[in-house]
Amino acid sequence: MPLFEIRGLTKRLDGQLVLDGLDLDIHAGEHLTIIGESGCGKSVLLKHLIGLMRADAGTIAFDGQDVTRFTERQWMDVRRRVGMLFQEGALFDSASVLDNVAYALREQRVMSEAQIRERVAESLAAVDLPGIEHMWPADLSGGMRKRVALARAVAMHPEVVLYDEPTEGLDPINVTRVYRLLGSLRKNLGITTVVVTHHMQSAFEKSERLALIHGGKVVKVGPPEVLRAWDDPRVAPFRRASELTAKTRPSRPSGLPPAT
Ligand SMILES: Nc1ncnc2c1ncn2[C@@H]1O[C@H](COP(=O)(O)OP(=O)(O)O)[C@@H](O)[C@H]1O
Ligand SMILES: [Mg+2]
């Protein structure tokens, strides 16, 4: 049984049909990357998975339960298990790092303040930023802000984290660092990892499956080699980007068959 089973998801925004009967399964433990051109509905899709947007039609099942028409109260329970790193980064500038990372933990009202502080410390350590609870977002570099947002997304020990363009606007060193962190969080905490990205090299190298959205639907989903081999104009720009970045790295020793 998939962790998320999305069927016929349809969403109209401002009169525009953004999602048009989208189908997708997300499996427990996998690293799935969602790709597609800007404005195709990737962020809109993720927002449906944590109940920030409600479907016009179609269904979303999470862990076997139909959550499509859940009330806000019921979504709170889902959000305990599904974390999200928002595209905008979205730290509260008027709150310390501690209060930012602790935000959802406090909202859930299940842990004591001492437990919350311990969890915040552990989450900051997990993103290689131990002991910065007292700092403020304005004191942090762009890369550090992303990592604090990452700490906040995993503080609840979610089973799934949805990362919406986690490396947007970062320099190459921080891009590598963030992807290393996603990998170790997944390995150490067993987190199912769903990433929306335009960073094609990591998309093709790190994920087990890619899903391409076009025209409000998932038009292709499969392992990287399947998307690479798919002879369709809709995947071409993404494949080309991944090949270009791959070419800048040392070439394979001659005599070996090409990678498939
Ligand atoms: N809250 C909203 N209200 C109206 N239109 C929206 C809203 N959010 C997104 N859209 C529109 O839906 C489309 C898909 O947006 P989005 O999911 O953010 O794209 P992307 O794939 O780049 O993440 C865009 O045309 C965007 O303008
Ligand atoms: Mg987006």
Image (cartoon, grey):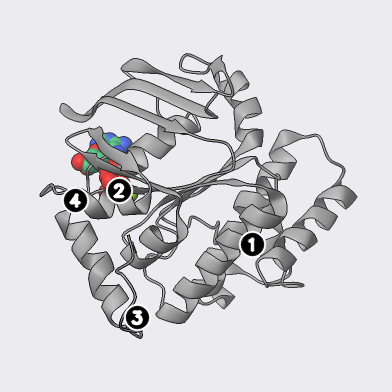
Give the distance between the C-alpha atoms of the residues marked 1 and 2, in whole angstroms: 26 Å
Quadrant of the frame with the C terminus: bottom left
Nearer to us of marks 1 and 3 is 3
Give the distance between the C-alpha atoms of the residues marked 3 and 4, in whole angstroms: 24 Å
Front residue (pair 253, 10): 253
Q: Mark 3 points at which residue?
A: 252
Disc on the earlier residue, 2 or 3? 2
Disc on the earlier residue, 4 or 2? 2
Front residue (pair 172, 115): 172
Give me the disc on residue 192.
Answer: none
Give the distance between the C-alpha atoms of the residues marked 4 and 2, in whole angstroms: 11 Å
Front residue (pair 104, 92): 104
The percent position of residue 110, horizontal first and vertical second, equals: 81, 34
Seen at 40% across and 25% down, the residue is 6
Give the distance between the C-alpha atoms of the residues marked 2 and 3, in whole angstroms: 21 Å
Q: What element carries label 3?
A: loop
The percent position of residue 42, horizontal first and vertical second, equals: 32, 43
Give me the disc on residue 235.
Answer: 4
Q: What element carries label 2?
A: helix
